Amino acid sequence: MGAEVVKADLEDAQSLEVALRGADGAFLVTDFWEHLSEEQEVAQGRRVADLAKQLALSYMVYSGLENIKQLTGGQLAVPHFDGKGRVEEYFQALGVPVTCIRVPSYFENFLTVFRPRKASDRDDYELALPMGNVPMDGMAVADLGPVVVTLMKEPEKYKGKTIGLSMDKLTVAEYAVLISKHTGKTIRDAKISLESYKMLGFPGAEELANMFRFYHMKPDRDVSLTQKLNPQARTFEEWITEQRTAFKNL
């Protein structure tokens, strides 16, 4: 059997209809970081949900997240979470047969936004993540696809469920130990507070501080279920053994 590639644009309902018509199911990921707009992400997700309902798709898998603003009574706003949460709610309100999956922090973040930084006063590196001693969930990006394949093969088993994914629950200090072990660099937990992180001043610092504050509440992420859905999914240590070149130029 072959595969037909169809172009679709989340901003173009007509192209989405062409892509979805005749499909048994679909997997949807919306990308907040492309436009940095919660409302645009919600509109994109709702557009697909409306078409899934209109075309009577038998199954959808949506990569959502918690609506933190709603869960905290407005105390915390995390737009890149909140929009996805609102789309989850919309799918469910429409009655579309859907499974919502909630990913943890990706291990790949340690190569970019969470990358260890050179300490200002020592010849070593720091992980500046305001988690204290609270474990932070994680998984590798490439391990998500096989999870979705399993869900698509067993829709009746998972329809209507919300599944929190994770392959490891480690403290910042534990992440630092493993990065040190596999890079030969000395990595330490910077022990930065939530308030200090919020004041770092880079674009999105306040939003990420609110995200980490939510992580302190230990959102539901299930390692054993993730392993069941993808038996080949990697722990952080298994993943980092494959990333030595990527960390070479710390």
Image (cartoon, rainbow, N blue to C red):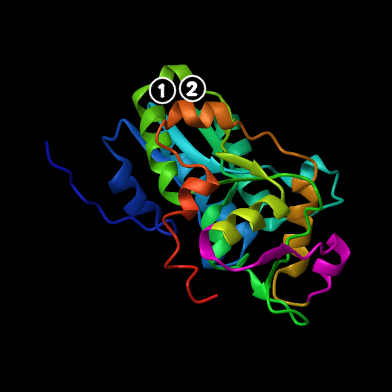
Establish if 189 lies above or below 238: below
Quadrant in the picture for residue 194: bottom right
Establish if 36 lies above or below 105: below
Q: Identify residue type, mark 1.
A: Pro
The residue carrying pointer 2 sits among few (fewer than 14), some (14 to 19) or many (20 or more) residues within 10 Å by Cα, namely: some
Tell me if 92 is positioned left or right of 216 in this view: left
In the image, is residue 219 part of the stretch drawn in magenta?
no
Tell me the number on the disc at residue 118. Answer: none
Per the image, the residue denoted by label 2 is 158
> In what element is the residue under mark 1?
helix
**Are the residues at dot 1 and dot 2 in contact (C-beta closer than 8 Å)?**
yes
Tell me the number on the disc at residue 155. Answer: 1
Query: Residue at coordinates 78% horizontally, 60% vertically from top-left?
Result: 209
Where is residue 169 shown, x and y percent of the image?
A: 65, 41
Q: Identify residue type, mark 2.
A: Tyr
Report the span colored magenta: 182-200
Q: How far is disc 1 from disc 2 in space, using C-alphas? A: 5 Å
Residue farthest along the left direction in this orientation: 1
Inspect this view and state whether residue 32 appears.
no
Inspect this view and state whether residue 50 appears.
yes
Query: Quarter holding the N terminus?
Result: top left
Query: Residue at coordinates 59% horizontally, 38% vertically from top-left?
Result: 88
Q: Nearer the viewer, residue 20 or 14?
A: 20
Query: Quarter holding the C terminus?
Result: bottom right
Where is residue 145 shown, x and y percent of the image?
A: 39, 42
Q: Nearer the viewer, residue 70 or 161?
A: 161
Q: Nearer the viewer, residue 30 or 240?
A: 240
Tell me if 72 is positioned left or right of 140 in this view: right
The residue carrying pointer 1 sits among few (fewer than 14), some (14 to 19) or many (20 or more) residues within 10 Å by Cα, namely: some
